[in-house]
Image (tube, grey):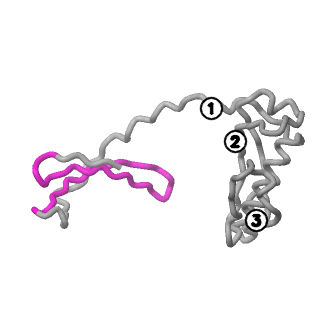
Amino acid sequence: MRSTQREDGEWAVTVAAQYADGRLRYFVVPVTADASGASFAVTGAPGAVAGPARAAVGKSPYGVSVPSDGDLSLAVGEFFGAYLTGAGEVDRYLAPGVKLSPISPAPYTAVAVQRVSAVQEAAAAGKVPADGTAVRVASALLRNHASTNTCA
């Protein structure tokens, strides 16, 4: 998690431990380094400490919900289907001159887009934009690493 030098060669190292029941606890461990800095030794018992404060999370710019049956959502799903399963070409979804090869070997056998959000209101309008129009989207894909190896 974090380390702080206290004196020459002495450090306080904060570590996190996750228990089997999901609890997360933090401990500070006193550590000493040898003169070369190549070897370390714990010099005392760990002490429980408070966890770090949570960082403030800003509002997402992707606040426009895109209809799941619209052209944009379908194109996002087709792109991820081609990219993550190796079925189909990704080139048709890329800007001219951009090269992106599908992941090989393909990690998934299927992809299902659960949600697409955009920055621009026009992305949710359902109309196909003019050539050269850039649309910033974020999508939610569910992954299932069970025996089917499906990205849903």
Q: Mark 3 points at which residue?
A: 85
Magenta segment range? 6-35
Q: How many marks?
A: 3
Residue 90 in which image quadrant: bottom right
Q: How crowded is mark 3: few (under 14 residues within 10 Å), some or many (20 or more)?
A: many
Give the amino acid at mark 3. Answer: Thr
Q: Residue at the front extreme?
A: 97
Q: Earlier in the sequence, mark 3 or mark 2?
A: 3
Name above or below for residue 31 compared with residue 6: below
Question: Which residue does the image show at 22% across and 49% down from the upper left?
Answer: 12
> Who is closer to the viewer here, 105 or 27?
105
Q: Name the residue under label 1.
A: 60
Tag 1 secondary structure: loop
Residue 43 image point, x, y percent: 15, 59
Disc 2, SS: strand
Labels 2 and 1: the sequence-earlier one: 1
Q: Which residue is drawn at 80% across and 33% down?
A: 123
x then y, percent, for residue 78: 82, 54
Instruction: Give whichever of 51, 56 is nearer the camera.
Output: 56
On the image, the x and y values in percent for residue 72 come to 83, 42
The amino acid type of the residue labelled 1 equals: Ser
Residue 8 is one of the magenta-drawn residues: yes
- Left/right placement of residue 122 relative to residue 28 reads right
Q: Name the residue under label 2.
A: 138
Does label 3 or label 1 sit earlier along the sequence? 1
- Residue at the image position 69 percent from the left and 67 percent from the top: 107
Between residues 90 and 43, which one lies in front from this camera angle? 90
